[in-house]
Amino acid sequence: MAFDYSWLIGGPQGSGVDTAANIFSRVGAKLGYHVFGKREYHSNIKGLHSYFVVRLSDKKIRSNINGANIMVAYDAETLVRHGLEIIKDGAIIYDASIVNTTVDQIPTLEASHKARLLKFFNSKNMEPNVSSILDLAKENGVKVYPISFRDILSNIANELNSPELSRMVRLFNVLGVSFSLGILKAPIEPLLEAIEDTFSKKPSIVDLNKKAANFSYNYASAKFSDFNSSISKIDKESNTLLVQGHQGSALGKIVCGCRFQSYYPITPASDESEFLETHEILQVKEDRPGSTTIVQTEDEISAIGMAVGASLTGVRSATSTSGPGFSLMAETLGWAGINETPVVITLFQRSGPSTGLPTRQGQDDLLFAINAGHGEFPRIVYASGDVEDSFYDTCKCFNFADIFQVPVIHILDKFIASSVVTCKRFEPDLISIDRGKLLEKIDGDYKRFAHSPDGISPRSKLGLENGVFWNTGDESDEYGHISEDPVNRIQMMDKRQTKVEQMLSLIPKDDQAVAYGKLDICIVSWGSPKGPILDAIEMHRNEGHEIGFIDIKLLHPFPTNYIKSMLKDSSIIIDIEANMTGQLASLIRENLLRDPDYYVLKYTGRPMTCIEIFDSLKKILEKKSEKKQVLTYGD
């Protein structure tokens, strides 16, 4: 029988939820399971609700499901938000001190959420408190296990003869994981190894956390032995690794030779730059040492300016940002466009407009990325669907930038950035580097913007002998001198636009879009919905229904002819994306003159689950669906 288990941990931000989830994810990977975890948190620094769901399975998974099998609740808010999502035969581990907490005593609940809860309790004729949630959970067939975290901490302190430990509430993260694994009767060795991995830079902390883990694991396994579910070690799939979402693009930058990245801190993009700062030097191959300079600038205007300046020296350069920061980059994006300067902008989308939902999921920025900057100039907009894609796609984006001498906007999003997943080990040997027409030597008269049949001119770099050139934000002639001559203007605009034909011709078809399954009933999507879509399709296949999927990666210039050929026999087209207006659908209408038959959209700021998409597709198959379905699962 297939094993598929989800674990949820929640508490106030700053209470160790992320650390606990990372330890649990490591344990799952060490036991041989596929892992998919996602983090949800508020945009304040500390105190509001945060939770992490980690799913383990003995088969490949790409998304989360609705609900969870087991939950660890540090506080009352976690219980009232998620207690009724725990699946039958699951378990809730909670701090015993919160059992009588009422809804009114939870100060961090939004007023609107509190009103919905009070209405719910009133409909059940129950008191609005944690105890009522636990009673309802028990009615649903869920085991509830009260544990006093502070008492356990005091017992550990007494056993180790270290009274100060009784006040070290930061150990709660390890206690929560250890309680869970004790109840699940999991082998303890992977837990102790995961603790060593997590705190490897703090040797003095490792031993203390391992002792706390042993104590709480043994306590839970002895006291709560009636739980029927268990987890054991299985044969691990070879050549896999556990990786956090933002690390895919960061490692891709190191491997493909990015030597400069600038950024201004912004969620969720900062994680990528901080990872690069921590790993600035990495020996990738004998002839390809990875050493990247990372600069935190005073704002995003400076960030893209420095990245463009670094590119002019001949190095591969990038900047990483999210929607509000990308807005500030629009003017310099145009400067890179008119000066035919290769640069990669890694755009981690989140929910807008304005600051919007700064720590939540969204695919709101597609049309903005395509149209950002005043005037007309070519650029590439490219999307990755998962962490593994992001590694290889990052390298492709740098090649595209160099070959076509254009800015490339590589679109990722918060769902990918905040995921923890197992995937195939990244293979640096599969990465090829193409610097395009970057010159190492120049003889004779040099024209930086010389006309050529493909619209791409040989590129000098600053300091190259005989490679003198001029850059300006104004229109220029072949040397780079400012020119307002109308004939020159037409020639230069046409020259730059010729690159678009080259992009569609030279970028391999498999890098433009990827098809899955039979395309009679066909989903079209882009970016992070890829994982839950593929999981939902597999669920329908198990029930005898075939649904196809086209993952469009090259979003600008839009591969019209290729997508048209793929959809020529499709009787039903279903657009699935995480925005309100169906921005990909607008590109399909514009370029294919065809409107999707159905829309499945989500814009709550929460990521899609495979269950949501499965249910939506089921309605379509049964002809019970409206043209537009809006997904709402997630707190």
Image (spheres, rainbow, N blue to C red):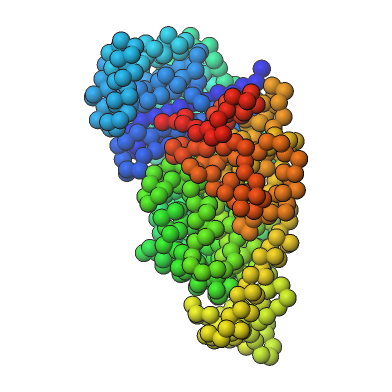
Q: Position of residue 538 (x, y in %)?
A: 67, 29
Q: Position of residue 111 (x, y in %)?
A: 27, 31
> Which quarter shows the C terminus?
top left
Above or below: residue 316 compared with residue 544: below
Instruction: Indicate left or right for 453 with 619 as reference.
Output: right
Name the one closer to the observer, 98 or 49: 49
User: Could you tell me which residue is drawn at 58 percent across and 64 percent down?
Assistant: 379
User: Could you tell me which residue is drawn at 41 percent across and 66 percent down?
Assistant: 301
Above or below: residue 404 compared with residue 221: below
Q: Position of residue 231 (x, y in %)?
A: 57, 20
User: Could you tell me which residue is drawn at 65 percent across and 50 percent down?
Assistant: 593
User: Could you tell me which residue is drawn at 38 percent across and 63 percent down?
Assistant: 299
Q: Position of residue 316 (x, y in %)?
A: 58, 66
Instruction: Indicate left or right for 123 with 291 as reference.
Output: left
> Which quarter shows the N terminus?
top right
Name the one closer to the observer, 33 or 561: 561
